[in-house]
């Protein structure tokens, strides 16, 4: 079946342009201009934005282990409603995804239940314990697109160096969370005036830089393909810039919350604002936005981390970290567009094209032959976010009750409509 | 009404006028407490529950005595030994207690912010008796009353707060209170015990005790909180005492009439010389304890008045 999107503002991150036009889709892929359009069903976009669907690296779906927090069905629906057409899931489940058997289980679950594409990452070390590498070869053959211990740092440099070396021989991508384990132990805020007044244990932003420096040295040594999951402090940026300039195969991501919120949002111990790494200063936030706009930071993701009410209704130090983000990533990112910090094609490079390229996927483009994974949205439509309207099983969003702009009206995966507003 | 707060969770949200109101009322309770018959009836018929999730002898006794002297029915609950150990969450514990209709809930908890969380879930007035490293408002109020009675004012004084600032909720509440009352604050301690960002609090920071004490009107010593330290903040207690322990020689750099304070319990020979602590010409440590009862009576009295007024308004509405 063919679809013709007419009267659209097309966001083309590959060509870096925003243009008015039509887009023809057939056989699940985008068709070249000039193809016969007669048989196509027409969707009038009425001047709204049509863009490649978001590729979100680092989504936590709580299967297996904590299905009451999130399942593939609920996460998939939330993703579709948020314009995300590919979820790349994290292996920090219980048990962790560290064997081909567990990977096979989640692959099957995702295929049965999720309306959007799901790819899986696997753990880099067994049990994410940082001692022995997982069966990287088998896991890759079974479909793992990247290897990561998520928020756990492989402290033993020898273990990490070996894993990087082994991964390199297979061309596998390693994703790491740069955070010096000693300095960050027990911390739940960023050190500074605010954290000290609140009496909360805090970590210096330097802890991120130190760990990134270590990782860059190991990448230089091993030649591995490396992606830093979240770079959140200004102090890390020169180290990242230097590594890229020296030709290391390095990319970096940032979560949407670090671009739109800062440490002061925690206020009187609001645990929905407790995330990992902790929210940073306003100076750091601005530096991250600038780094995203300049392309130094490659990938913008939701860092979707569902937590139930019980794990958040605790004193701040004891409360669980993380925030849901599948449905709020797009409207929150639109804040950066509306503030004039970034334009739509550049934003979409970070949301869609760059993550797809890093994982070797054909998505993220509007070129002929690219998969027809698309999101149609009104960038200016205002709404008041009510967390209980979210499709996720968990409702832990820091944006509850906030005014947002940018509403998804339709999402397509391989030309099939998976969401209608 | 010049005291509008519903809870006393910290100094942060108090207005200077509210602080003065508490201190003025506390002054009158000092007189009551010094009389032969120490009974008022401001809290008659009200129920006060002291919930201590962390060990305390002095603060709990002070709150208990304050409540009893004003006629409240006081119950002490040592939460360390209770349902928390059985896995009940803080919120559940709060809801259970709330169902018993207390009027005043006095809470101490080892986690910063825990008392704020609890206050959101109950109908009664909540008094923070110390939460983690965050605040200890009644301690700051009793310190302020002690200073005001000794110096006649709270503004334009130079107050040196010395020692383990990083782990101290007493320091945070005192810095907030003295700042609101427009005194000049100095923090003195080894840099490992000065919290990050302290220089942005509108205070001066010193790591040389003698320089920091120069010309001070008030010298406030803090207890070295060994139980909150996970290793390696200071090289040894003897080196700490040598550099930051208060003795007569270091005190000579402060003003001649400077008073010496300590929130207790003291580590004699670690942060303060024992003889100096007992010197009735310099040390007001015993008076601080006395002021503690009066300030807590005043705070609970004022909160109870607001509570009764709120309830009356609720009945009429």
Image (cartoon, coloured by chain):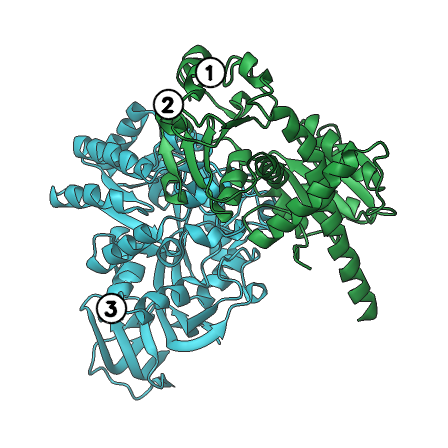
Compare residues A204 and A296 and report the one nearer the observer. A204
Q: Which mark is residue B248?
A: 1
Whether residue A157 can be seen here:
yes
Q: Which residue is mark 2?
A: B210
Task: Give x and y (percent) for residue B282.
Answer: 55, 22
Residue A196's disc number: none
Residue A64 in the image, given as x and y percentages of width and height: 54, 44
Which numbered dot is residue A345? 3
Q: Earlier in the sequence, mark 2 or mark 1?
A: 2
Chain designation of label 2: B
As helix, strand or loop, the secondary structure at mark 2 comes to helix
Chain corresponding to cyan in the figure: A
Identify which residue, B218 or A54, lies in the foreground.
Answer: B218
Q: Residues within 10 Å of mark 1 (few under 14, many from 20)?
A: few
Q: Which image quarter is the N terminus of chain A in?
A: bottom left
Left or right of residue A113: residue B130: right
Task: Tell me: residue B71, above or below residue B213.
Answer: below
Q: Residue at x 42, y 28 (%)?
A: B193
- Residue B125 on image: x %, y %: 72, 50
Q: Disc 2, disc 1: CB below 8 Å?
A: no
- To which chain does the residue with label 3 belong? A
Q: Nearer the viewer, mark 1 or mark 3?
A: 1
Image point (55%, 34%), residue name: B170
Query: What is the drawing colour of chain B?
Result: green
- Please state if B228 lies on the left or on the right of A164 as rendered: right
Estimate the spatial distance between the alpha carbons at disc 1 and disc 3, rounded to whole Å.
70 Å
**Label 1 with label 3: CB-CB less than 8 Å:** no
Label pair 2/3, CB-CB below 8 angstroms: no
């Amino acid at each position: 079946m063919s679809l013709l999107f007419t009267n659209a503002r097309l966001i083309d991150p590959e060509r870096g342009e925003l243009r008015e036009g039509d887009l023809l889709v057939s056989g699940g892929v985008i068709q070249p201009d000039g193809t016969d359009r007669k048989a196509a069903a027409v969707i009038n976009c009425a001047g709204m934005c049509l863009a490649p669907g978001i590729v979100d690296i680092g989504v936590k779906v709580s299967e297996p282990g904590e299905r009451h927090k999130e399942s593939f069905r609920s996460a998939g629906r939330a993703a579709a409603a948020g314009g995300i057409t590919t979820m790349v899931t994290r292996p920090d489940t219980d048990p962790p995804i560290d064997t081909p058997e567990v990977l096979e289980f989640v692959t099957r679950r995702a295929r049965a239940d999720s309306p959007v594409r799901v790819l899986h990452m696997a753990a880099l070390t067994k049990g994410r314990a940082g001692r022995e590498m997982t069966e990287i070869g088998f896991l890759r053959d079974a479909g793992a697109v990247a290897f990561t211990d998520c928020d756990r740092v492989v402290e033993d440099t020898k273990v990490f160096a070996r894993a990087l070396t082994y991964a390199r021989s297979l061309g596998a991508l390693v994703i790491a969370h740069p955070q010096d384990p000693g300095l960050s132990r027990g911390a739940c805020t960023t050190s500074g005036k605010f954290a000290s007044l609140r009496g909360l244990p805090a970590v210096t932003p330097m802890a991120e830089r130190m760990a990134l420096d270590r990782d860059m040295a190991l990448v230089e040594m091993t030649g591995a393909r490396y992606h830093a999951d979240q770079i959140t402090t200004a102090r890390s940026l020169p180290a990242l810039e230097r590594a890229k300039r020296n030709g290391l195969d390095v990319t970096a991501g940032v979560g949407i919350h670090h671009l739109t919120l800062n440490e002061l949002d925690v206020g009187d111990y609001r645990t929905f604002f407790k995330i990992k790494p902790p929210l940073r200063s306003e100076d750091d936030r601005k530096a991250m936005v600038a780094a995203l706009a300049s392309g130094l930071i490659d990938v913008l993701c939701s860092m979707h981390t569902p937590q139930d009410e019980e794990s958040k209704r605790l004193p701040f130090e004891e409360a669980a970290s993380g925030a849901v983000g599948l449905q709020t990533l797009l409207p929150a990112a639109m804040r950066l567009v509306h503030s004039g910090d970034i334009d739509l094609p550049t934003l979409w490079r970070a949301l869609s094209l760059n993550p797809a390229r890093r994982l070797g996927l054909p998505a993220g483009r509007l070129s002929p032959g690219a998969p027809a994974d698309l999101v149609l949205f009104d960038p200016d439509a205002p709404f008041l976010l009510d967390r209980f309207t979210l499709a996720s099983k968990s409702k832990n969003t820091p944006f509850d009750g906030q005014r947002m702009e940018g509403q998804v009206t339709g999402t397509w995966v391989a030309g099939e409509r998976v969401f209608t507003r | 009404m010049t005291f509008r707060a519903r809870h006393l969770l910290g100094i942060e949200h108090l207005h200077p006028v509210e602080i003065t109101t508490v201190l003025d009322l506390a002054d009158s309770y000092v007189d009551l407490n010094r009389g032969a018959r120490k009974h008022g009836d401001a809290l008659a018929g009200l129920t006060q529950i002291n919930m201590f999730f962390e060990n305390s002898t002095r603060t709990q006794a002070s709150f208990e005595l304050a409540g009893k002297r004003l006629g409240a029915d006081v119950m002490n609950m040592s939460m360390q030994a209770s349902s928390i150990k059985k896995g009940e969450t803080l919120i559940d514990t709060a809801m259970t207690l709330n169902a018993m209709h207390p009027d005043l809930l006095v809470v101490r908890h080892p986690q910063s912010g825990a008392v704020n969380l609890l206050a959101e879930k109950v109908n009664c007035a909540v008094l923070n008796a110390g939460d983690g490293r965050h605040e200890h408002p009644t301690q700051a109020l009793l310190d302020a009353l002690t200073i005001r009675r000794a110096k006649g004012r709270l503004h334009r004084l130079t107050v040196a707060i010395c020692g383990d600032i990083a782990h101290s909720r007493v320091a945070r509440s005192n810095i907030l209170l003295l700042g609101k009352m427009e005194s000049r604050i100095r923090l003195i301690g080894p840099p490992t015990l000065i919290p990050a960002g302290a220089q942005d609090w509108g205070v001066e920071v010193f790591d040389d005790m003698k320089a920091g004490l120069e010309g001070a009107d008030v010298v406030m010593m803090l207890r070295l909180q060994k139980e909150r330290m996970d290793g390696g903040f200071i090289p040894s207690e003897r080196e700490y005492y040598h550099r930051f322990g208060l003795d007569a020689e270091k005190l000579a750099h402060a003003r001649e009439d400077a008073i010496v304070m300590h929130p207790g319990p003291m580590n004699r020979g670690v942060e303060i010389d024992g003889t100096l602590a007992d010197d009735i010409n310099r040390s007001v440590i015993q008076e601080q304890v006395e002021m503690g009862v009066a300030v807590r009576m005043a705070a609970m009295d004022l909160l109870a008045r607001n509570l009764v007024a709120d309830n009356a308004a609720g009945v009429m509405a």
